[in-house]
Image (cartoon, helix red, strand yellow):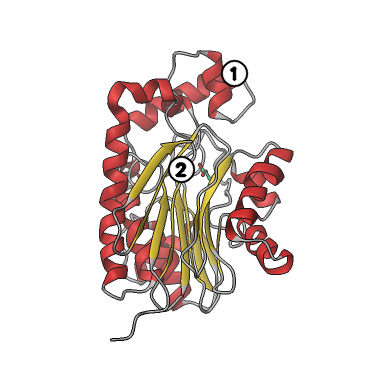
Amino acid sequence: MTVPPFRPVIAIHGGAGTMSRAHAATGQEAAYHEALHAVLLPAQALLAAGGSALDAVSLAVDLLEECALFNAGHGAVFTHAGTHELDAAVMDGATLRAGAVCCVSRVRRPARAARAVMEHSEHVLFAGAGAEEFARRHGLELVDPSYFSTAARRDQLQRALAADRTLLDHDGAALAADTPAAPLEERGKMGTVGAVAVDAQGSLAAATSTGGMTNKQPGRVGDSPLIGAGTYADNATAAISCTGTGEMFIRLAVAHDVCARMRYGGLSLAQASEVVVHEALPAIAGRGGLVAVDRHGNVSMPFNTEGMYRGHARVGEAPYTAIFG
Ligand code: ASP
């Protein structure tokens, strides 16, 4: 029997806008760990059975979108107008093929739509009504926009709207500082889901899906669906999925920057992702984090916020999940 040269691993995130440590003490933390495990296990099994990194990240993001705890798919945040506008992207590191959708409000599983764009069109990014029509033509489920709404997210919008009258800052920590007793999770504006993986062939893939930031202006597009900003995969370097204040991730082309620092600067995965998250992003007040893997199975999950819902699972090992630093 030949031993595969690459040890498959999947890493996921559920956003850098987490609950505060104080709120975690109330027991909410367990539900998040459980949800992360429930995503990692089937993706790990898929990789163990010889499945591709692309299928593993697609499955993981599919499950994260369907989980109301995370800001993607069902449970997505509200825009300033009280609507939902979802963004998603997927990239195959073996071929550099990529697909994405943005500003969709009727596609139940935006990451599947992103993959359909990658596999069934000559384009990379579809927006709004055109993206929805494309998804419909490719047999994807469309839903009434109210499908994405949850009471918790509506409450979060109300708090963000109220806070905006006195605070311009879009950061959850600053909002919470206003009223220290309030859990960050309720008032924070961030959250996104994503997955990166390497398979037994040494191929990489990345996928990201989000409702964006609470109280965002209608029509605003974040980093998640932009290839090179919130999502990137290249077998020569790494697969990256980001979460955080999207505008700064766009301005720094964060996901591609990690790969570029590896490729041109000779940095390791950990060095490249840490310098971007802990030096480049803070220099322009960018907050958030990312998950990254390389083809040797190294995993890096740095963040500069209080926490980031995250985890990874190597084939043959128990999954690891974490929320805080
Ligand atoms: N990066 C996402 C966006 O700006 C939000 C997030 O990750 O929390 O749309």
Left or right: residue 69 versus residue 307 is left
Q: Earlier in the sequence, mark 1 or mark 2?
A: 2
Give the residue at x 66% y 64%: 262
Q: Please say whether residue 143 is visible from this viewpoint.
A: no
Residue drawn where x is 45% and y is 75% of the image: 202
Q: Residue at left 26%, top 73%?
A: 49
Question: Is 21 located above or below residue 307 in the figure?
Answer: above
In-front residue for pair 148/210: 210
Say which residue label 2 marks. Answer: 15
Evaluate if marks 1 and 2 touch, with contact meaning CB atoms under 8 Å apart. no
Q: Residues within 10 Å of mark 1 (few under 14, many from 20)?
A: few
Query: Tag 1's secondary structure?
Result: loop
Task: Report x, y in % for residue 293.
Answer: 50, 61
Q: Is residue 212 left or right of residue 10?
A: right
Residue 320 image position (x, y, % from top left): 35, 48
Residue at image position (57%, 48%) is 222
- When the figure is inspected, residue 272 is found, relative to residue 198, above or below; the finding is above
Relative horizontal placement of residue 143, taking residue 99 as reference (left or right) = left
